[in-house]
Amino acid sequence: MTARRVVFIGAAGEMRKIDIERFAKADGDLHLVLCDIRPELVHPLAKRLPDGRTTVRQLDLYNPPRFARSSTAPHSSNWTREPTSAAPSR
């Protein structure tokens, strides 16, 4: 059986760390993907979790092209960016 993947976005946050630790202790075949814009802040937590069950990834939700290429992005091939401001009218 293949491990189910659980993706945590904002993994460096204090409340998210609590969630991650609870999932790591839970029964089941889970692989935890810890995503944050600053993955170096997540590595200390990942080292405390069971070996082989954790992946740390950099993820910037505010960079649409990079987010779209991420394997953790839902429907990444359909990602479109909404305009951030209206074009000036002439």
Image (cartoon, helix red, strand yellow):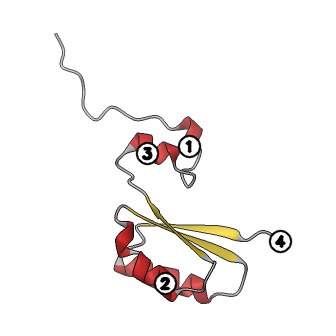
| Residue identifier under label 2 | 47
| Residue identifier under label 3 | 66
Amino acid type, mark 4: Met
| Residue identifier under label 1 | 76
- Neighbours of disc 2 within 10 Å: few (<14), some (14-19), many (20+): few
Asked which quadrant contains residue 3, the reply is bottom right
- Count numbered badges in the picture: 4
> Residues under labels 1 and 3: Cα distance?
10 Å
| Residue identifier under label 4 | 1
Give me the residue at 72% from left, 82% from top: 28
Viewport quadrant of the N terminus? bottom right
Amino acid type, mark 2: Lys
Q: Report if the CB atoms under discs 1 and 4 are less than 8 Å apart.
A: no
> Residues under labels 4 and 3: Cα distance?
31 Å
In front: mark 1 or mark 3?
3
> Residues under labels 4 and 2: Cα distance?
25 Å
Element at label 2: helix
Viewport quadrant of the C terminus? top left
Of the numbered discs 2 and 3, the one sitting upstream in the chain is: 2
Give me the residue at 45% from left, 47% from top: 67
Q: Does 53 sit left or right of 38 as displayed?
A: right
Residue 78: x and y, percent?
56, 36
35 versus 60 height, above or below? below
50 versus 41 height, above or below? below
Of the numbered discs 4 and 2, the one sitting upstream in the chain is: 4
Q: Report if the CB atoms under discs 2 and 3 are less than 8 Å apart.
A: no
> Residues under labels 1 and 4: Cα distance?
26 Å
